[in-house]
Image (cartoon, rainbow, N blue to C red):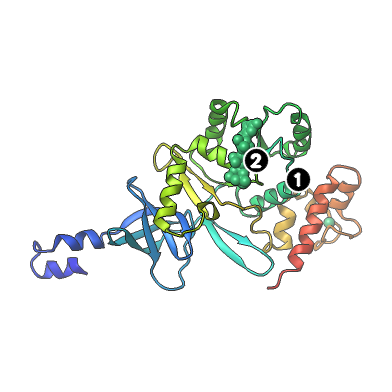
């Protein structure tokens, strides 16, 4: 607007202040708290607290945005870039958007405390259904007494074709960093894990100054609440293409409630080759005669716990208040 106005007036006299306040900048949303968003500029500069333009616009951590600064410490988001995908944290009643543009899910498990196989199964389904590549990480392999059991519990998932990495973040940090960077470098990865598995240790291992960055976010968003309650994005070192880690504290389940039965059956890789062989084209794989999935459960090609999880999820999506 000012540019056109100054051009009409002959060009050269545009006040310097307008050129700084109205320049459109590009960045990525690295934290969100209510309608406050922290945007990290692509040029590596200091993150700026921004508000979306318009009352209802929703922005997610990981969104690429165009923004303009409105004062020294505030800005406005003027456009959201095209999203590759969008994740929701959902329960029976509502789903809330929380992260965008991800491509991998890192499921952090440990030899100790005992991890929940139910949560692991749900995380894998959610990843499959949302088009994310799941990676299973077994941490704390230095705890030798409990390692064999943890490995044995993960064998099923290796057989299904999932990537299972093993590290000791604490006792062999250099090896752990190398293994993790080989899989996380260049990707947008969201972390998921029960308490005590080693998510924070992992972030601190891979992100220089993660703790300082967290304090900065807390100050910038000025929430007065403990920072571990909001989703945040950490850029991996090495520039804008190095990838990022997204940590969403307390995040254990997502996107399962708005799935359809059709999406659900295909989220079990061991079901997929059988789906065309059920007697009924609309088979639910629960009680139907001539069901190829049930036959495979019967003769042990499909594990009972996996089918039980499927049946449980079919039940849960049927309970959703739409
Ligand atoms: N023995 C052993 N302990 C580890 C290892 N990695 C992390 N720990 C310890 O496990 C405990 C939990 O690690 P955190 O990184 O805080 O776990 P978290 O997943 O962030 O847990 P929440 O923040 O509660 O969700 C800490 O006491 C760590 O020091 C490891 O490789 N070996
Ligand atoms: Mg933690
Ligand atoms: Zn069937």
Residue 49 vs residue 118: left or right? left
Provide the secondary structure element on which disc 2 rests. Answer: loop
**Ligand 1 within 8 Å of the CB at mark 2:** yes
For discs 2 and 1, the disc positioned in front in the rendered view: 2
Task: Give coordinates of residue 236: x percent, y percent.
Answer: 46, 40
Provide the secondary structure element on which disc 1 rests. Answer: helix
Quadrant of the picture in which ligand 3 is shown: bottom right
Residue 292 vs residue 79: left or right? right
Task: Give coordinates of residue 238: x percent, y percent.
Answer: 41, 36
Residue 117 vs residue 201: left or right? right
**Crowding near the residue tagged with mark 2, few <14, some 14–19, many ≥20 C-alpha atoms within 10 Å:** many
Instruction: Please name the residue shown 15% across and 70% down the image.
Output: 5
Task: Give coordinates of residue 29: x percent, y percent.
Answer: 43, 55
Whether tag 2 and tag 1 are in contact, CB under 8 A, the answer is no
> The N terminus is located in which quarter?
bottom left
Using the image, tell me which numbered label, if any, was put on residue 197: 2
Res 122 seen here: yes
Residue that badge 1 annotates: 117
Instruction: Please name the residue shown 73% across and 48% down the image.
Output: 121
**Crowding near the residue tagged with mark 1, few <14, some 14–19, many ≥20 C-alpha atoms within 10 Å:** some
Question: Which is nearer the N-term, disc 2 or disc 1?
Answer: 1
């Amino acid at each position: 607007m000012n540019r056109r106005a100054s051009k009409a007036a002959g060009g050269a006299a545009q006040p310097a202040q307008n050129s700084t306040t109205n320049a459109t900048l590009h960045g990525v949303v690295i934290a969100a708290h209510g309608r406050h968003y922290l945007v990290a500029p692509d040029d590596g500069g200091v993150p700026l607290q921004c508000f979306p333009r318009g009352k209802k616009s929703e922005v997610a951590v990981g969104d690429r945005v165009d923004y303009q600064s409105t004062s020294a410490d505030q800005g406005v988001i003027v456009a959201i870039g095209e999203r590759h995908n969008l994740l929701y944290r959902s329960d029976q009643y509502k789903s809330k958007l929380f992260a965008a543009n991800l491509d991998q899910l890192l499921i952090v498990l440990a030899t100790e405390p005992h991890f929940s196989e139910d949560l692991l199964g749900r995380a894998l389904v959610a990843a499959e259904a949302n088009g994310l590549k799941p990676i299973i990480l077994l941490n704390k392999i230095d705890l030798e007494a409990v390692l064999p059991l943890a490995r044995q519990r993960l064998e099923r998932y290796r057989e299904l074709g999932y990537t299972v990495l093993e590290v000791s973040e604490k006792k062999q940090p250099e090896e752990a960093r190398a293994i993790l960077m080989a899989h996380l470098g260049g990707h947008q990865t969201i972390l998921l894990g029960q308490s005590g598995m080693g998510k924070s240790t992992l972030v601190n291992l891979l992100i220089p100054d993660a703790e300082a960055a967290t304090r900065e976010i807390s100050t910038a968003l000025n929430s007065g609440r403990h920072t571990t309650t909001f989703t945040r994005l950490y850029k991996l070192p090495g520039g804008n293409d190095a990838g990022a880690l997204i940590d969403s504290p307390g995040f254990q389940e997502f996107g399962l409630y708005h799935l359809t039965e059709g999406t659900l059956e295909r989220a079990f890789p061991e079901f997929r080759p059988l789906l065309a062989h059920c007697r009924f084209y609309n088979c639910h794989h629960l009680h139907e005669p001539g069901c190829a999935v049930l036959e495979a459960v019967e003769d042990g090609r499909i594990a009972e716990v996996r089918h039980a999880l499927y049946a449980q999820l079919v039940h849960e999506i049927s309970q959703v208040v739409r």
